[in-house]
Image (spheres, rainbow, N blue to C red):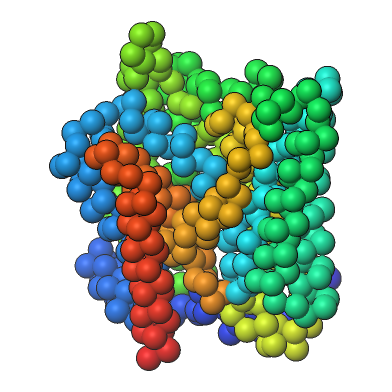
């Protein structure tokens, strides 16, 4: 039974433009110079990965640092990350459907409705974990509904989710109105220490060092095992020197983040420690990375995004995979709603779900996920969300208006789409 193949396994390599078959390892990659030459060839061939957004993010950070030295202060850096948390998680939600070549325009209001349900139940006296579970299940159920309509009726996801955005915005207004005194003035205030702590509290200094040290060790171990398995499988893998450098860079980044988080960033009182929002985002990132990178469902998502017809002929249940992808998108949007409520301390009828979802799509695309399907990773939402957050934060420090923030974000998004287009042309060539 160990050798029985699932339907479609034989076509996965040919149906995924994001993960083309790699040549067997040869002596050219046994040295650091040879491996760097191999990477340069991949970049010239259109496989640039997250390199453009990393270079762009570095350039943007340097620019704002030069314009405003306050940009790289511990207080601003930690605030920037916590403010970007809900954009990052909503971007992760969009990646599930973007990989299929679809889009979910309703995700912003899915998040808002999940937050309203959660806060409503909390105000009525339900335990916080019951309230959170019900809110997440409601968001996942709506995602499944959209996925079923899109997959089984063959309707464009753009139209289905646009209708969903309009409908959910009305539903949110109705739900807040029905809360009565709980939603005074169209605002439901959050009164729960656990959920408030996501954006409003942090680990102690000691726990910050311990948690980030554990993350550093696990990250370095994952890099080592990944390169070792690739080498053992006969694929191109970095030489030991490059692997060691990546492991050291991971450890240095984690410990550097712990050091910055433990610097005092309070004005009237001492505030130190890693915000809980960062830990939550990292947990979601690891979970969905495993789902997309280590499960059959994840391989099927990439296969359908690369070539839906080939995946269908290979025996993959395209409708079921698409429905599940929309369900996970809704579930992650529900997580975003709770994080967003924690950030605001409330949820109100003034939530701009449409703007939030556009920022999320922008974050995913800026990070390197393709709008055409088949290429993308959860890490792209993190990188792209940081780019969007850095732009908003930096322009606020410079005293520019919201109109300038939107226009600069639009320019960065346009540049990211152009890079994606050029990348696809390079792959075709």
Residue that protrudes farthest toward the front in the picture: 185
Q: Quadrant of residue 50?
A: bottom left
Q: Is residue 417 left or right of residue 355?
A: left
Q: Evaluate whether residue 86 shows in this view.
A: yes
Q: Is residue 111 above or below residue 158?
A: above
Q: Is residue 5 left or right of residue 422?
A: right
Residue that protrudes farthest toward the top in the picture: 269
Q: Nearer the viewer, residue 387 or 231?
A: 387
Q: Residue at x 66, y 77 (%)?
A: 304
Q: Nearer the viewer, residue 77 or 22?
A: 77
Q: Is residue 198 left or right of residue 235?
A: right
Q: Residue at x 37, y 91 (%)?
A: 429
Q: Evaluate whether residue 217 shows in this view.
A: no
Residue 419: x, y in percent? 36, 73
Q: Is residue 17 above or below residue 258?
A: below
Q: Is residue 321 left or right of residue 102?
A: right
Q: Quarter holding the N terminus?
A: bottom right
Residue 23: x, y in percent? 44, 80
Total residue callouts: 0
Q: Quadrant of residue 323?
A: bottom right
Q: Residue at x 59, y 80 (%)?
A: 306
Q: Residue at x 67, y 43 (%)?
A: 112
Q: Is residue 251 above or below residue 108?
A: above
Residue 259: x, y in percent? 33, 26
Q: Nearer the viewer, residue 153 or 174?
A: 174
Residue that protrudes farthest toward the bottom in the picture: 429
Residue 244: x, y in percent? 33, 49
């Amino acid at each position: 039974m160990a050798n029985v193949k699932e339907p479609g396994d034989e076509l996965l390599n040919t149906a995924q433009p994001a993960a083309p078959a790699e040549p067997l390892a040869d002596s050219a990659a046994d040295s650091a110079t040879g491996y760097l030459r191999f990477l340069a060839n991949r970049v010239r061939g259109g496989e640039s990965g997250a390199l453009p957004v990393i270079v762009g993010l570095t350039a943007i950070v340097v620019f704002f640092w030069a314009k405003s030295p306050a940009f790289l202060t511990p207080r601003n850096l930690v605030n920037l990350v916590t403010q970007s948390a809900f954009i990052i998680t909503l971007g992760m939600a969009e990646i599930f459907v973007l990989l299929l070549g679809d889009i979910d325009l309703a995700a912003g209001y899915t998040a808002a409705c999940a937050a309203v349900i959660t806060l409503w139940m909390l105000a009525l006296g339900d335990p916080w974990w019951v309230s959170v579970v019900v809110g997440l299940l409601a968001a996942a159920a709506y995602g499944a509904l959209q996925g079923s309509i899109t997959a089984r009726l063959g309707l464009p996801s753009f139209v289905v989710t646009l209708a969903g955005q309009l409908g959910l915005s009305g539903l949110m207004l109705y739900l807040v109105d029905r809360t009565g005194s709980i939603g005074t003035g169209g605002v439901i205030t959050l009164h729960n220490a656990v959920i408030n702590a996501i954006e409003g509290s942090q680990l102690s200094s000691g726990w910050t060092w311990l948690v980030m040290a554990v993350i550093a060790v696990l990250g370095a171990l994952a890099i080592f095992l990944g390169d070792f398995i690739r080498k053992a499988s006969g694929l191109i893998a970095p030489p030991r020197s490059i692997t060691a450098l990546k492991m050291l860079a991971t450890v240095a980044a984690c410990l550097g983040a712990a050091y910055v988080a433990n610097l005092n960033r309070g004005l009237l009182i001492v505030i130190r420690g890693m915000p809980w929002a960062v830990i939550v985002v990292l947990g979601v990132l690891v979970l969905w990375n495993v789902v997309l990178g280590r499960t059959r469902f994840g391989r099927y998502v990439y296969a359908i995004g690369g070539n839906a017809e080939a995946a269908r002929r290979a025996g993959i249940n395209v409708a079921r995979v698409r429905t599940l992808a929309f369900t996970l998108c809704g579930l992650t949007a529900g997580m975003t709603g709770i994080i967003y409520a924690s950030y605001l301390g409330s949820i109100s009828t003034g939530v701009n779900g449409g703007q939030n979802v556009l920022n999320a799509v922008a974050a995913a695309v800026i990070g390197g996920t393709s709008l055409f399907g088949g290429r993308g990773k959860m890490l792209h939402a993190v990188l792209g969300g940081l780019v969007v957050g850095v732009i908003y934060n930096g322009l606020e420090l410079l005293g520019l208006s919201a109109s300038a923030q939107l226009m600069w974000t639009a320019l960065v998004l346009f540049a990211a789409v152009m890079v994606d287009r050029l990348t696809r042309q390079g792959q075709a060539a």
